[in-house]
Each structure stands twice: as C-alpha cells, then as structure tokens.
Image (cartoon, rainbow, N blue to C red):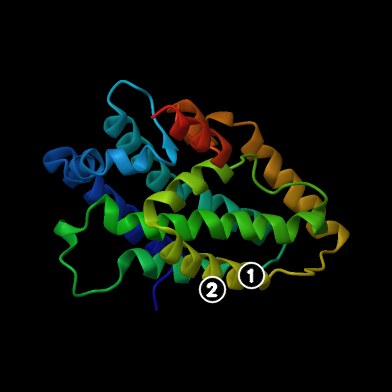
C-alpha cells in the first residue's frame, strides 16, 4: 500500500519530469502556437508571445497541485476529516496508466490530472465552508480553472467535473465539533500568513477569458 508521503512524491516526480521535458523539447508551447487562432476565440493572452505566457501558466497550474493538495489534507486532518480517498485518487491519476513511458509524459498529459485536482479542491472547499464558516483555502481558482477547461475541451472537462462533484459530495453536510472547527481555523491561519503560496496564476500572467458579448463585438469588426 502506498503511503501519503509516497503519493505526493510520485505526483511531484511526474510533474518534474513533464516540466523538464517541456523545457528541453517545447512540445506544449509548439502545440499552443499552432492552435493560437482558435484559442484567441476564448482565451485572452498578452500580445507579446502568448504561447510562452500560456505555457508558463500551465506549468505553474500543474506545479501547484501537490502543495495545495497537501495543505488541504493538513486542514482536514486537523479537523479529523478523512482526506485519504481523495489524495489516493488524484495521486493515481498522475501516476497511471503504468504502461506509459514516464520520460514521455508531457504537460498536456498532466493537464487533465491537474484540472481534476484543482476542481476537487474547489468542490471540497465549497462543501466544508459551511461547517467552519470560512473558505478553507485563501485563493480563488475560478478563472484559472475556466482557462484550463477551455484547453481541455468542454466534453472532457464535463467528464472530469463529474468526478470532482462526486469527490466533493463526500463532504456534504459534514458535521464538525467546536474543537475540530477551532483546529481547522488555526491551521488555516498559518497558510494565509504565507500569501506567496497562493498566487493568482491567470491574473499574474495576464491571461483571462473573453465574455460571449465581447466575442460578438469582435466579430462585427471583421
């Protein structure tokens, strides 16, 4: 049986290999450059080297998963809430399928796993917030998740969303005693005091989404 530490180590190893592969071969950036005309219909990028900015955003989005996941698990443990099934599922999604050659797994292959993790964090945060009265994690990943959703495609993203909702439903109507709530709030306070750990990936990289009304206005200009 894989331990908690091993789950996170495997996740980190997969991410490190994918980032190294991208830095050496640039496969994801080239793919983004080819699909740039289509992406500009929904994703708003900086005018200067949009593919580079989007690739950097994706790297940071994927790299955040182990740390953010581990911090949410720490919060849950402080309150006596079982997080192990969530961590195991997400950890296995990064490591599987085993027949893939590890050295050939690039950013694109991990982006769906990262989306699964970030959306699950969002769902659990929403389910547990009523129990403790405050958001568990000090970040708003909505824009970043929507950008990645566009990259994955609506059909695939909907399939992943269904898994995330199911994972989040495990924490619906979670009852926490006063001691558990206090322990969770004190643990959360430590995370808030380290704001650099909770960046706004999309905002910092000047990446956003065009609203449908904006797209209609742009079409009138052509």
On screen, residue 193 versus residue 37, left or right, reads right
Q: Quadrant of the C terminus?
A: top left
Which residue reaches farthest left?
25
* 47 to 18, vertically: above or below: above
Q: Quadrant of the N terminus?
A: bottom left
On screen, residue 116 versus residue 181, left or right, reads left
Residue carrying label 1: 82
Question: Residue 187 at what x, y percent from top left?
Answer: 69, 46
Q: Secondary structure at mark 2?
A: helix
Which residue reaches farthest bottom?
1
Residue at 55% across / 36% down in the picture? Answer: 198
C-beta proximity under 8 Å, tags 2 and 1? yes
Residue at 63% across / 59% down in the picture? Answer: 123
What is the tally of numbered marks visible in this picture?
2
Residue carrying label 2: 85
Instruction: Depth check: give the residue in front, 49 or 55.
Output: 49
Q: Quadrant of residue 212?
A: top right
């Amino acid at each position: 049986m894989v331990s908690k530490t091993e789950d996170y180590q495997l996740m980190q190893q997969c991410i490190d290999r994918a980032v190294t592969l991208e830095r050496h071969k640039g496969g994801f950036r080239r793919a983004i450059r080819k699909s740039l005309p289509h992406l500009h219909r929904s994703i708003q990028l900086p005018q200067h080297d949009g593919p580079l900015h989007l690739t950097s955003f994706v790297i940071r989005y994927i790299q955040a998963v182990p740390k953010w996941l581990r911090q949410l698990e720490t919060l849950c443990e402080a309150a006596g809430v079982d997080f192990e099934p969530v961590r195991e599922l997400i950890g296995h999604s990064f490591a599987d399928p085993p027949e893939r050659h590890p050295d050939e797994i690039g950013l694109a292959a991990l982006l769906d796993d990262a989306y699964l993790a970030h959306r699950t964090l969002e769902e659990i945060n929403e389910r547990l917030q009523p129990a403790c009265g405050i958001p568990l994690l000090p970040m708003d990943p909505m824009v970043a998740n929507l950008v990645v959703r566009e990259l994955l495609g609506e059909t695939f993203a909907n399939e992943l969303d269904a898994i995330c909702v199911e994972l989040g439903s495990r924490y619906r109507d979670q009852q926490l005693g006063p001691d558990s709530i206090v322990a969770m709030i004190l643990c959360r306070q430590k995370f808030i005091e380290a704001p650099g750990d909770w960046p706004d990936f999309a905002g910092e990289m000047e990446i956003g989404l065009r609203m449908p009304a904006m797209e209609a206005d742009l079409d009138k200009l052509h």
